[in-house]
Image: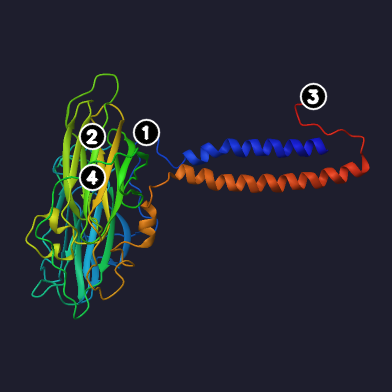
Amino acid sequence: MARSGAGVVAMTALCVLMLVPSVAGAASQDPSGDVPEYRMGEDSRPVHGTGSSTDGPVLDPGTYTDTLTAGDKKYYRVKLDAKSNAFVSTVLAPPPEVKVGLMDGIRVSLESPDGTECSSGDLVVFASNTARPIAGYGTRRIQANGPCQSAGEYLYTVERVGSANSDSQAWPIELKYMSEPGLKADAVAPEAPTKWSSQAPVPPKSAAKPVTGGTGFNDAAPVGDGAWKDEVRPGESRFYKVPVGWGQQLFVDAEMANAGTGQQPFVVDGVRMELYNTARGLADSVQTQYSGKPSALELGTAPVAFSNRFAAKPEAVSALRFSGWYYVQLTLDRQVAQSVPMTLSVSVEGDEQSGPEYDGDAVKAGFGISDADKEAVRGGDESLAMRTIGFTGIGIGTFLLLSLGMWTLVAHRRAATARTTPWRVPGSG
């Protein structure tokens, strides 16, 4: 019986140890597998927009899911106060395998009941034949003599636009309503800088750390200063998020490796990199060709400033209106022949400055950088696999100690009645 007990302990320990790599590897995506679909927020709630503006469902601050078929225009209602800035976004997330047209996309708007636009309608299109998540938002800004300043119920509309030959099936959408606190009564909005350097910093010399980009905004991988290596499949988008504080600039450089052996097609817009702000508003987009040879693309931003939202500047500047997470989306065109390794170099430049005096908790509302955000990227993001191995290792150690103690107790009791029975390690003969 003692020998059997030892065998159970040894075999159980061996099985658990063999499971560790499998558990750790489950967190990463297989570069050779199917392209994963956009992952909706864990806290998202299903909602059904209507074709009538009078009975659209009410959206509270939070995240929602719905669908859009070709030509759909859906209405939702949001209740706004008279002091908060409102941002209502929509992510259009078609299945990765469907074909899309260059001008397929979504048009979103936020309007008062009498039809006054709170901001210019945001039209976002694929500008490509590769399906990927795209997002746009409607906004209401608190400002003197601006539209939509009173409290009340407003209409948010989402329209799927495109050609008649586009895929007509229902595509998932994710809506997110974020309410940014207004400023205190006596507070003055900090002025935005008028000059800044657009010179990209020298890329970091440190070794690139492994990272696995997410499928969208909800599971984007947190990255900070430094170099990060990943691999992207044809037709896939990978998302990363970077915390950027007031007064800071973000520079991102993506270097695509050669695609190895075999015939590679020349794809004009083979690689695309897009930058979204904290509220999922598109800030910038760059693209470059890919033909199987090394290729690179980069983007850099103006300093993040609250007053960027008021200035008559391009969206690449006015979208940089929040302190908080900024999202980098990297997409490899579906025409590329095989997966491509890549290195993402990230640099956040400038000292973080004090922000505006909010009349409320901006960080809790999703705007700003918390200590947890900083901790997520401080000193480099350790891989989920390593964390899993570490935690599993602790569990294994505890399990083995408990099992060994239990076996020892049983062995002692058996020895008291059968001291002539030899103990052997299974398989020792």
Badge 4: how crowded within 10 Å, few (<14), some, or many (20+)?
Answer: many
Residue hosting label 3: 429
Q: CA distance from mark 4 to mark 1?
A: 22 Å
Residue hosting label 4: 252
Q: Which mark is residue 31?
A: 1
**Residue 89 place in picture, x, y as percent:** 23, 58
Image quadrant containing the C terminus: top right
* SS label for mark 2: loop
Q: CA distance from mark 1 to mark 2?
A: 15 Å
In the image, residue 277 above or below residue 28: below
Determine if residue 135 is in view: no
**Residue 62 place in picture, x, y as percent:** 32, 64
Q: CA distance from mark 4 to mark 3?
A: 62 Å
**Residue 67 place in picture, x, y as percent:** 28, 52
Report the mark closest to the observer, 2 or 4.
Answer: 4
Q: What is the residue that sits farthest to the top in this orientation?
A: 262
Tell whether 382 sits left or right of 301.
Answer: right
Tell whether 76 sits left or right of 223.
Answer: left
The amino acid pointed to by label 3 is Gly
Badge 3: how crowded within 10 Å, few (<14), some, or many (20+)?
Answer: few
> Which residue is drawn at the image coordinates 85% and 45% (left, top)?
412
* SS label for mark 3: loop
Residue hosting label 2: 333
The amino acid pointed to by label 4 is Val
Tell whether 318 sits left or right of 413.
Answer: left
> Which of the two labelled residues, at mark 2 and mark 4, occupies the earlier sequence position?
4
Mark 1 vs 3: CB contact within 8 A = no
Tell whether 96 sits left or right of 42.
Answer: left
> Which of the two labelled residues, at mark 1 and mark 2, occupies the earlier sequence position?
1
